[in-house]
Image (tube, rainbow, N blue to C red):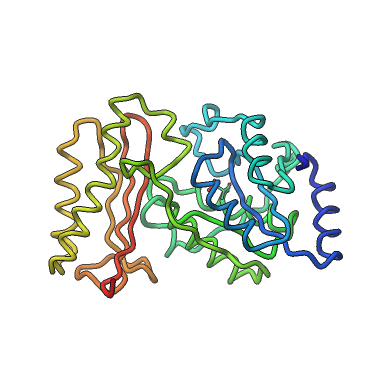
């Protein structure tokens, strides 16, 4: 495995891979790799001749008051994980190379996809995500790129961007990986102390309770949402950012539970903002 630190070298490797007629899968990350990332890498390994993992803590997707400085970084640890998983290349560019002086062009997703869920409290977040991914896609030129379904809004926005901007890249969504007690794996879980870690299970528990209600015939989305809110509010360390019940295809808010309903939430546990979701298929 090789760690590539310059954009030029990465581009040249990508060109060689292309001319060798090999397929390449990209797993874009901000590092501090966990089981969720590992599952994306495993899927990319299955599907492609070569796998590139990009590791770049992207400053443009953090708001000034967010945790950019404290975002966990450990390249050595990440490299060891990638090596074990037989990743071919890590692309780890410098911030100053990705955003040179006078950088001024951004890729802005449509408001219909960003004025709900995480976009409400993080208005510039997805602009930063789409901008950095456009850059990474152009530098790495993968045939496929792998994203977790935990960040369901990000996945939907990236799929739309790729279609709207005619990127020749297949965006592959991969299932959420969870701890034994149901908490979705995330780099942010490292911020939780032990009582917060216990409290964090409320996200999954409340979604499972909502699923039970729907499975036993509840069709009123507002009632389902109210039950989630009630359950989370009983947890003293939790503070709701949003609980949304949406049509999975259009992201429109629902009054009546539909065939494919997305339950999506962001909840603060202490100062740590955690997200989780579930797509409920009435045909299941
Ligand atoms: O999901 C992430 O880790 C980031 O948003 C991504 C896709 C790597 C872009 O910086």
The residue sitting at 38% across, 50% down in the picture is 120
Q: For this rendering, which residue is in front, 188 or 65?
A: 188
Q: Position of residue 70 (x, y in %)?
A: 52, 27
In front here: 264 or 108? 264
Q: Quadrant of the C terminus?
A: bottom left
The residue lying toward the viewer, choosing from 78 and 125, is: 78
Q: Is residue 150 left or right of residue 235?
A: right
Look at 53% across and 31% down and name the residue there.
Answer: 71
Position of 206 with respect to 162 (left or right) is: left
Point 59% across, 30% down: residue:
73
| Left or right of 156 on screen, residue 243 | left
Front position in the image: 112 or 82: 82
Q: Position of residue 56 (x, y in %)?
A: 64, 41
Compared to residue 162, the image places residue 133 above or below, namely above
Q: Quadrant of the N terminus?
A: top right
Q: Position of residue 164 (x, y in %)?
A: 59, 71
Which quadrant would residue 57 be assigned to in this image? top right
Tally of marks: 0
Residue 269: x and y in percent read: 31, 33
Q: Residue at x 32, y 25 (%)?
A: 194
């Amino acid at each position: 495995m090789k760690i590539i630190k310059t954009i030029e070298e990465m581009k040249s490797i990508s060109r060689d891979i292309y001319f060798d007629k090999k397929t390449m899968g990209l797993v874009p990350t901000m590092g501090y790799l966990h089981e969720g990332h590992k599952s994306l890498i495993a899927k990319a390994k299955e599907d492609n001749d070569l796998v590139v993992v990009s590791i770049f803590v992207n400053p443009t997707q953090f708001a000034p008051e967010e945790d950019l400085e404290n975002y966990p970084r450990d390249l050595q640890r990440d490299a060891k994980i990638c090596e074990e998983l037989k990743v071919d290349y890590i692309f780890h560019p410098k911030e100053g190379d990705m955003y040179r002086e006078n950088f001024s062009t951004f890729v802005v997703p449509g408001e219909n996809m960003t004025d709900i869920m995480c976009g409400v409290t993080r208005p510039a977040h997805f602009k930063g995500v789409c901008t950095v991914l456009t850059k990474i896609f152009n530098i790495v030129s993968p045939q496929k790129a792998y994203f977790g379904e935990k960040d369901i809004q990000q996945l939907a926005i990236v799929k739309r961007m790729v279609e709207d901007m005619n990127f020749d890249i297949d965006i592959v969504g991969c299932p959420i990986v969870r701890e034994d007690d149901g908490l979705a794996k995330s780099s942010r879980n490292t911020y939780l102390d032990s009582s917060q870690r216990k409290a964090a299970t409320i996200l999954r528990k409340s979604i499972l309770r909502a699923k039970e209600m729907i499975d036993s015939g509840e069709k009123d989305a507002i009632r389902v949402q109210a039950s989630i809110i009630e359950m989370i509010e009983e947890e003293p360390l939790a503070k709701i950012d949003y609980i949304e019940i949406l049509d999975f295809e259009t992201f429109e808010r629902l009054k009546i539970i539909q065939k494919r309903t997305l339950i999506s939430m962001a909840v603060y546990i202490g100062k740590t903002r955690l997200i989780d979701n579930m797509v409920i298929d009435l045909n299941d």
